[in-house]
Image (cartoon, helix red, strand yellow):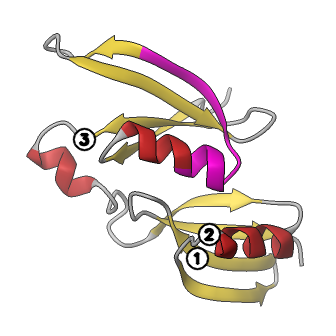
């Protein structure tokens, strides 16, 4: 058993795809036309870390309630965790790509960590070995 997808509500598909694939290095696993429950067009967009694993369903906000959730899906808490093998290289690359880090790197008993915002404004931990 595994969790296959987690939804991230975004303002627009294409900038979100560009962030997750171009900045974080995820793979675009699917980008297909789809329909809302009431028949309006939308897209089914899935990105995954290289090699698979749990993917993100990038869902464009539909309506005022969902728009208010963009960037605040976990109400100000870190809600997503990106584990990398080479923390320092990944951190430098992300800084060069103008990713907003809200907390600088620090060492913890479990390894290195820094907090950043994704394109929607959600908080993530960048995690690496000590």
Quadrant where the image shows the N terminus: top right
Q: CA distance from mark 3 to mark 1?
A: 24 Å
User: In this picture, is 10 found above or below 93?
Assistant: above
Element at label 2: strand
Mark 3, residues whose alpha carbon is within 10 Å: few (<14), some, or many (≥20)? some
Q: Earlier in the sequence, mark 3 or mark 1?
A: 3
Residues shaded magenta: 19-32
Is 52 contained in the magenta span?
no
Mark number, residue 115:
1
User: Which residue is tagged 2?
Assistant: 125
User: In this picture, is 67 found above or below 45?
Assistant: below
Which of 20 and 115 lies nearest the eye of the viewer?
20
Q: At 39% across and 65% down in the image, what residue appears?
A: 121
Task: Write down the quadrant of residue 90 in the picture.
Answer: bottom right
Q: Earlier in the sequence, mark 3 or mark 2?
A: 3
Residue 34 in the image: state x and y as whole percent.
34, 13
The answer to whether marks 3 and 2 mark residues whose Cβ atoms lie closer than 8 Å is no
Question: Which label sits in the foreground, 3 or 2?
Answer: 3
Residue 9 in the image: state x and y as whole percent.
35, 45
Which of 51 and 96 lies nearest the eye of the viewer?
96
Mark number, residue 106:
none
User: Which residue is tagged 3?
Assistant: 61
Q: Earlier in the sequence, mark 1 or mark 2?
A: 1
Mark 1, residues whose alpha carbon is within 10 Å: few (<14), some, or many (≥20)? some
The answer to whether marks 1 and 2 mark residues whose Cβ atoms lie closer than 8 Å is yes
């Amino acid at each position: 058993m595994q969790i296959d997808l987690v939804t991230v509500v975004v303002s627009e598909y294409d900038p979100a795809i560009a962030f997750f694939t171009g900045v974080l290095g995820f793979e675009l696993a699917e980008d297909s036309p789809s329909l809302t429950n009431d028949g309006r067009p939308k897209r089914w967009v899935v990105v995954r870390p290289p090699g698979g694993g749990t993917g993100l369903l990038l869902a464009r906000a539909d309506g005022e309630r969902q728009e208010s959730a963009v960037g605040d899906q976990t109400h100000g808490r870190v809600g997503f965790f990106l584990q990398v093998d080479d923390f320092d290289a990944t951190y430098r690359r992300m800084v060069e790509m103008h990713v907003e880090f809200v907390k600088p790197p620090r060492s913890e008993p479990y390894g290195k960590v820094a907090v950043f915002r994704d394109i929607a404004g959600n908080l993530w931990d960048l995690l690496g070995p000590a």
